[in-house]
Amino acid sequence: MKRFDPTLYFITDSTGFSIEDFTAVTENAIKGGASIVQLREKERTTREYLYLAQKVHEITQKYGVPLIIDDRIDVAMAAYAEGVHLGGSDMPIDTARRILGEDIIIGATAKTVEQARQAYLSGADYLGVGAIYPTTTKVKTVLTSVETLKDICESVPIPVCAIGGLNKDNIDILNGIPIDGICVVSAIMKADDPEGAARELKKAATRITDK
């Protein structure tokens, strides 16, 4: 299996940012401890998405951090990204695996134990589970209880990351849950000091995931 560290999984949101400011936030997040970066662009054209992916990949490669492309395996392939994240309405995981090969990281979204098991059997390398809290992103969310999160963690042998509205003030709800990492968007993207915010979140995530 591919080796990667999901402890602090940073998901980007370029809304309202210039490309220069956006890439600066991304780099500062990595400097603060983001161990994996997902580029998530729901409203850009394919050409715009690819251009941004290439810009971000230059940064992630400099720090040895994997870049995951949300939804689009074509953009992931064209940008030579390390992985892709697939939701329930995206390309099936087993089909993506057949196209991308074994060396590419494939993540999947799961909200139930059944979805988690199916994603694992289809070839997913990790799962994003949530939303634990309501989010301020443009992505539609359905809340997932910490009890379900715990059941999912115990049902599959691949890393599980909690996602959805998590920040330094509410992350303690995950204490005692055998997750492998946390996914954050706004807690870093909207921070006055993205590097400092990432550093604080990484410390909290490391404490929770220290099994």
Image (cartoon, helix red, strand yellow):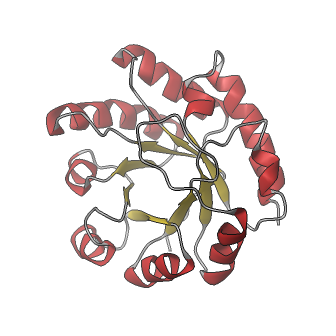
Q: Foreground residue, 38 or 82?
A: 38
Q: In percent of the image, x 82 and y 60: which residue is there?
A: 210
Q: Is residue 76 left or right of residue 143?
A: left
Answer yes or no: is residue 169 visible. Answer: yes
Q: Position of residue 133 (x, y in %)?
A: 63, 47
Up-down: is 104 above or below 156?
above
Q: Residue at x 40, y 78 (%)?
A: 123
- Please say whether residue 29 is visible from this viewpoint: no
Looking at the rendered image, the quarter that the C terminus falls into is: bottom right
Residue 25 screen position, x and y as percent: 52, 23
Left or right: 45, with 148 as reference point = left
Question: In the image shown, does 115 or 158 lie closer to the viewer?
Answer: 115
Q: Check the image and report above or below for 27 versus 93.
A: above
Quadrant assignment, res 33: top right
Residue 118 against residue 141 in the figure, above or below = below
Q: Is residue 172 left or right of residue 43?
A: right
Instruction: Give the tally of numbered discs.
Output: 0
Residue 204 at x, y percent in the picture = 80, 44
Residue 195 or residue 121, whichever sits in front: 121
Residue 50, quarter of picture: top left
Question: Can you give x and y, in whole percent of width and height, for residue 54 in the image?
Answer: 29, 35
Q: Residue sitting at 77 percent across and 65 percent down? A: 177
Could you say which quadrant of the image residue 155 lies in?
Answer: bottom right
Residue 161 in the image: above or below residue 17: below
